[in-house]
Image: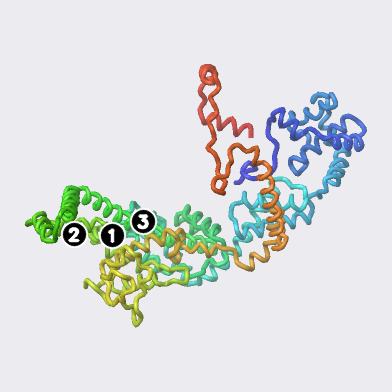
Amino acid sequence: MPSVHDTAYPRLKSSFSDKELNAIFTPTAEEMALTHKIAQTTALRIGFLVLLKTYQRLGYFLPMHKVPRQVAEHLSLLYGVYYEAVEWQAYDASGSRYRHIAFIREHLGVRSFDDTARQILTESIRQSARLKEDPNDLINIAIEELIRQRYELPGFRTLLDEAQRTRAEVNRLIYGGVSVALGGDRCHLFDDLLETDPLTKRSLWHSLKVDPGAPTLTQLRHLVARLRWLKSVNLTPPHLFAGIPPAKVHHFALEARSLDAARMLELEPQKRYTLAAALVQHQFAQCLDDLAEMFIRRVRKAHRHAREDLTKAILSRQKQTDHIVDTFYQLLLAWRDGKTAKQRLATISGIFGDQTETLIEQCQAHNASSERSSLILLAKYFHNQRSLLLTILEEANLVAPGADKSLERAISFITKHKARRQGSLPARLSDEALDLAWVPDKWWRLVTGKEKRSTEVTEINRRWFELCVFTQVALDLKSGDLVIVGSDKFSDYRDQFVSDEEYRTSVTRYCEYLGISSQSVVFVAKLREWLAATAARVDAGFPENEQLRIENGEPALSRLVRQPEPEKLRMVTHLLSEQLAPVSILDVLADTEQWL
């Protein structure tokens, strides 16, 4: 159950420093004058000040026996009266206390917690309960709304009971809506998931909650099989949780995950089906996330191995490279020093001798050490996992959220031809030419066999095109240019944008909360005014700013010069270490919790 310490409900610490007492609880001259006007005796003035200053800090009135002695004594000593000399209980029981409370409310412009305030409390919790599940969040939002509308805060228990009651009411409506959307047949399937097999003593519910293991090739195959099973049972129709915030659905899934089959069966049916559906959707999204992560890792690993092989190959051919350069140097000298064309040709022929073919082979090997040579070395790392990677692309619903669908069509192309083993394929998808504009330049010659992109492409190399698609899919998944429908981590972030309707209903209140104008003209004018004021302040301080200078018309900050270490700092540190005993971090945390 949530406690007051987990929320923003105001409360007084058990102890205060002198600085805090003076800053928080020392009354102003105006407040002292007000006190003398309202109360005629010293005891009543002390009681009035305690009520006033604690309310200003808390937003609600405390009985005197709950006010920390340190605070009450700080205020009583203003009149030269010690804590023990004040009859605190008598003040609490007097009618003066209630008159003082009424006057403080009027003076501060706040209202007592009445029926109207309770309606505001209920409505604010109801609105937030549609978005959030944690009672602490609901209580904090309710506190903020009551303070905004200038109401005295009720007791914490009132807030907690209202948060739990209203949240349960909102959730019951959600459970009912989800159950209706599921339909009777799917609800029966969920009941089947919870049935325990008499032989294995396990239920499908237990299998559903199992997390994937290490990202091995075998585990990757298990994930694909798991994804196909989740698709086949079809327990969560599209848009089942439409209109329900993802954070709330995620909480439902976590709650379902914490329950075994027996405890799930104890739940009220509508709640049981909603929690089960949330978990199935969560596990489906998690399965897609895991597959995408493993796909990206394997593509990256293949490229890393190819680059490492390239580096090793370059180092192993260093002597050949030196020989090629030396031969070319001799050719240049022969060309420069030769008097006639006949002499030059004779000298060059002597340099080549019988090593012409060897030099050609060495040059070809050296050319392989270009930027695309690491791509040439990729093929062997995809040979054993080609079929599985193609299956992932086939099972995952990959969508390009933008207008350019060329990579989507490329994925459809390679999955359609995954059984083909020919070296080349016609560059056509159905009756349309395959759009290859997305293919990076370093892949172009490998994929098309053409040097120039302007040349018409009628055939593509199947193997290199598949590797190019694998690589681009991994890159686009990381950048968000490619999304997976039903995934969580790789879903379209645009779906989480605020709708136009929600914007129109919330913008005014949101701007009021931030203290800015919701009118675009006024908002822009204020921004320009703020920018001009900031620029003027910076300009005015520039002559005295030793860290800022102008270089080539642009501002540049100088590196801060480290201040010299005080002469006796090390000695003081040494003396402190000798005097202070080591303290466990757990003891520090325990003491801090007690102070708070």
Image x and y of residue 244, in percent: 57, 63
Which kind of residue does numbered mark 1 sit on?
Answer: Arg
Reading the image, the residue beneath label 1 is: 372
**Image quadrant assignment for residue 119:** bottom right
Cα distance in 3D space between marks 2 and 1: 14 Å
Q: Is residue 196 visible?
A: no
Residue 317 image offset from top left, x and y in percent: 18, 50
Image point 57% across, 46% down: which residue?
A: 555
Which dot marks residue 239?
none
Query: Which SS class for mark 3?
Result: loop
Viewer-proximal residue among 165 and 427:
427
Q: Position of residue 339 (x, y in %)?
A: 14, 56
* Mark 2 crowdedness (10 Å alpha carbons): few <14, some 14-19, many ≥20: few
User: Could you say where residue 150 lies in the image, as x and y percent from the top left?
Assistant: 78, 50
Q: Earlier in the sequence, mark 1 or mark 3?
A: 3
For image coordinates 87% across by 30% down, the residue present is 43
Q: Secondary structure at mark 2?
A: helix
Q: Quadrant of the C terminus?
A: top right
Of circles 2 and 1, the one toward us is 2
Q: Are marks 2 and 1 in contact (CB under 8 Å)?
A: no
Q: Is residue 566 above or below residue 212?
A: above
User: Could you tell me the amino acid type at mark 3?
Assistant: Lys
The answer for how far apart the CA atoms under marks 2 and 3 are is: 65 Å
Residue 415 at least partly seen: yes
* Mark seen at residue 201: 3
Distance of mark 1 from mark 3, alpha carbons?
A: 56 Å
What amino acid is found at the position of numbered circle 2 in the picture?
A: Gln
Q: Observer-nearest residue: 155 or 465?
A: 465
The residue tagged 2 is 364
